[in-house]
Image: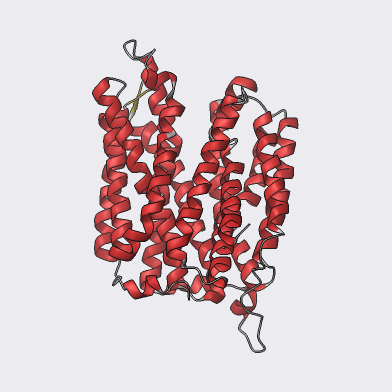
Amino acid sequence: MNIKNRLTLMSFLQFFVWGAWLITVGNYWFATKQWSGAEFGAIFSTLGLSSILMPALIGIIADRWVSAEKLYGILHIFGGLALCYIPQVDNPATFYWVIFGAMLCYMPTISLSNSVAYTILKNNDYDVVKVFPPIRVWGTIGFIAAMWLTNLSGNKASANMFYISAFAAFILGIYSFTLPKCPPQKLIEKGSSLSQKLGLDAFKLFGTYKMAVFFIFSMFLGAALQLTNMYGDVFLSEFGNMPQYANSFVVQKSTLIMSISQFSETAFILAIPFFLKRFGIKQVMLISMLAWVLRFGFFAYGDPSFGGTSLIIMSCIVYGMAFDFFNISGSLFIETTTDSKIRSSAQGLFMMMSNGFGAFFGGIISGQVIDAFFTHDGVRDWHSIWLAFATYALVIAIAFSVMFKHKHNPEEVANVSH
């Protein structure tokens, strides 16, 4: 199996592990365990907290002390053990801590998988900007495959979803040890500063105006991603409270409708090399932000009627551009603009700001805002909610266009493989 195929399998399994339970855990929580909604909200906070705590730390370890592919494998094996234990849990408090442990292991592997792939590709003289997106697209396919497997096998409310996820995690963990070596980039030299010895040099990127602005806006866009993950399916399902829509396809198959977003990802990932080389990171991220405006705006005017369903589908289609042009392009931007000695750490910082602080604060603040301003007598005003989110994305786009200073250099992107 050649290098690209081996990394493709890694990417597929990476997101298969997550997709096996992330979309359906609510069914297990409410239908099988019959636990409360208030406690369920805390489960998704583990994703943000884990992304704050772990990716930067794991990136430092990979940069300084442990080969990235081995560390990657160890994390998946321990994460798989935690997933195996979840079906034994019989109370919400313990469930929270076990899933938190699983996420502490899983979330840093997202950025670490990027570092492993970039290192192996560059060591084999591949153009990362051209070759990586077609590899990464199989991660999205893996997520979809796991989601459909869990549903079609009758396990969307069963503890078996966690066993499916754990089995994939064990396979990936063992497989990781067969990948080409990705050793630490730099040994600790005599006379090194304390920050260098501890591997904290990546945090100095915040001292550079351009990188600081990039990381801050990564946090803001990470919040937008959390909004659509938290509320998209609930929004469609609540049309069922309206008699004229109760039996509509959109309500009955809301998860299937939302999965169009993941299919859209697979198309837009493949477009990244062209857009990134042609327009540069600033324009690509601006396109992402404007796509978020459309994502929320289409939802605001969508409903299960024929015309309204078209808008919902359009929202799911532009999601691929909104997500990929931010997450994948942002990761490639880090790869092209940071020193190789701190690259894993820098990828961890990107993950920490977007999926960590962004997701955590986006989830908390959006919930408070919705309850305070857009919920009346227990009924959510989704039209106003989505318009508010669209306005948020538009303000972020305008601010980013003014504050982020970056001159596109096509040669810089073209030479990323060197």
The relative height of residue 206 versus residue 226 in the rendered view (above or below) is: below
Q: Is residue 305 visible?
A: yes
Q: The N terminus appears in which quarter of the rendering? A: bottom right
Q: Is residue 24 visible?
A: no
Q: Is 360 left or right of 29, judged from the image as shown?
A: left
In percent of the image, x 42 and y 36: which residue is there?
A: 367
Q: Nearer the viewer, residue 324 or 352?
A: 324
In percent of the image, x 64 and y 38: which residue is there?
A: 96
In the rendered image, the residue lying farthest to the bottom is: 191
- Residue 60: x and y in percent read 61, 68
Q: Nearer the viewer, residue 113 or 145?
A: 145
Which corner quadrant of the image does residue 115 belong to? bottom right
- Residue 78: x and y in percent read 73, 49
Q: Nearer the viewer, residue 228 or 73?
A: 73
- Residue 161: x and y in percent read 64, 32
Which corner quadrant of the image does residue 67 belong to? bottom right
The relative height of residue 296 versus residue 201 in the rendered view (above or below) is: above
Q: Is 37 left or right of 329, judged from the image as shown?
A: right
Which corner quadrant of the image does residue 22 belong to? top right
In percent of the image, x 64 and y 67: which residue is there?
A: 62
In percent of the image, x 64 and y 68: which residue is there?
A: 182
In the rendered image, the residue lying farthest to the top is: 243
Q: Is 182 left or right of 315, judged from the image as shown?
A: right
The relative height of residue 12 versus residue 211 in the rendered view (above or below) is: above
- Residue 231: x and y in percent read 42, 33
